[in-house]
Image: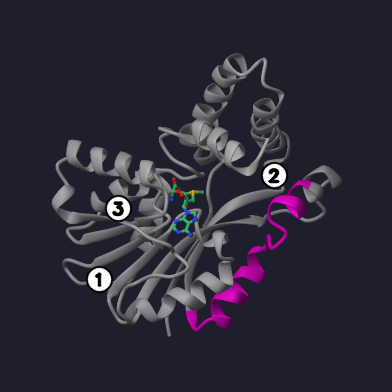
Amino acid sequence: MDEEQTLQIFFEIHQDLPREGPGAFESTQKAFLMLPELPKQPLILDLGCGPGMQTLDLISLTDGNIVAVDNHQPYLDQLRERAAQQGVSDRISVVNGDMAALDFQANTFDVIWAEGSAYIIGFEQALRQWKPLLKKSGCLAATEVAWIKANPPEAVKMFWAKEYPAIQDIDANLTAIRRTGFRPIGHFILPQSAWWEHYYTPLQARLQTLQEKYQENPEALTVIELHQQEIDLYRQYADFYGYVFYVMQAD
Ligand SMILES: C[S@@+](CC[C@H](N)C(=O)[O-])C[C@H]1O[C@@H](n2cnc3c(N)ncnc32)[C@H](O)[C@@H]1O
């Protein structure tokens, strides 16, 4: 299977899911409420917004405006449609762009939001690169996978060594936050329900459907099986790694 076919099956697995990573309204709200006082109508940049569940959660928590960026157009179409259904299109700008090469002026945003997306360019590098886009004393909130219990079993270490070798523990991420010129305001581990309800449970259902569709296609089944392994690993070892919300303010 060439790379294009792998991507095709990847996006068939992921299309039209409620979200593209762990997260939940309660967690987005908890992080948002940690922010210091904001202008009445803050301008928020939501990076790697995916289909936009957290974008819509955020817009319900503020009178401000959101610029939502992703580089996969079908996710952006999904967000646009959901925003229209909820009557909030006038406060959300949907932008197809690369989070590694953003085209915004410095000192533009009151808040940067990044749920499950900073890892794409690396947590520390993302903070460093995005900070200039914030106004003075602007804030950034991001989720990132982290070790949350010492001595993970070999199977877990092997999975993460392959999928995201840069994974580190919470203290190391707090150190990275300070190193990039931010002051940590607060952090918390997302509950396990935030992995299941809007992400792994719908993903699991999708895998079952596609397993039947592609039963004669070993290459597609390999991609499906990799997703299944990720879900099974979390089911077994959720005590050892988790998504952590970090809320910080620029020095
Ligand atoms: C793990 S998903 C998280 C999506 C969403 N924030 C959520 O929690 O449901 C990461 C998102 O980043 C997007 N992405 C990947 N590389 C990107 C890039 N270079 N620039 C912008 N978005 C990117 C993907 O299309 C995907 O929607």
Mark 3 vs ligand 1: CB under 8 Å?
Answer: no
| Residue 151 magenta-highlighted | no
124 to 5, vertically: above or below: below
Picture coordinates of residue 24, whole percent (x, y): 42, 43
Amino acid found under the numbered disc labelled 1: Leu
The residue that mark 3 highlights is 58
Q: Which mark is drawn over residue 239?
A: 2
Query: Which stretch appears magenta?
Result: 159-182
In this view, the mark in front (3 or 1): 3
Q: Quadrant of residue 38?
A: bottom left
Q: Is residue 29 left or right of residue 62?
A: right
What secondary structure is marked by label 3? helix
Viewer-nearest residue: 24 or 48: 48
- Looking at the image, do the residues carrying marks 3 and 1 touch, with CB atoms under 8 Å apart? no
In which quadrant of the rendered image does the N terminus lie?
top right
**Element assignment for label 2:** loop
Image point 66% across, 30% down: which residue?
228
Q: Residue at x 19, y 36 (%)?
A: 85
- Say the numbered circle drawn on residue 38: 1
- Amino acid at pointer 2: Asp
**In front: label 3 or label 2:** 3
Where residue 144 appears, as percent x and y from the top left, is 56, 58
85 displayed left or right of 58: left
SS at badge 1 = loop
Question: In front here: 169 or 55?
Answer: 55
Q: Main secondary structure of the magenta part?
A: helix
Q: Is residue 160 above or below residue 198?
A: below
Judge left or right: residue 71 versus residue 41.
Answer: right
Q: Is residue 141 above or below residue 22?
A: below
The residue lying toward the viewer, choosing from 136 and 16, is 16
- Quarter of the picture containing the C terminus is bottom left
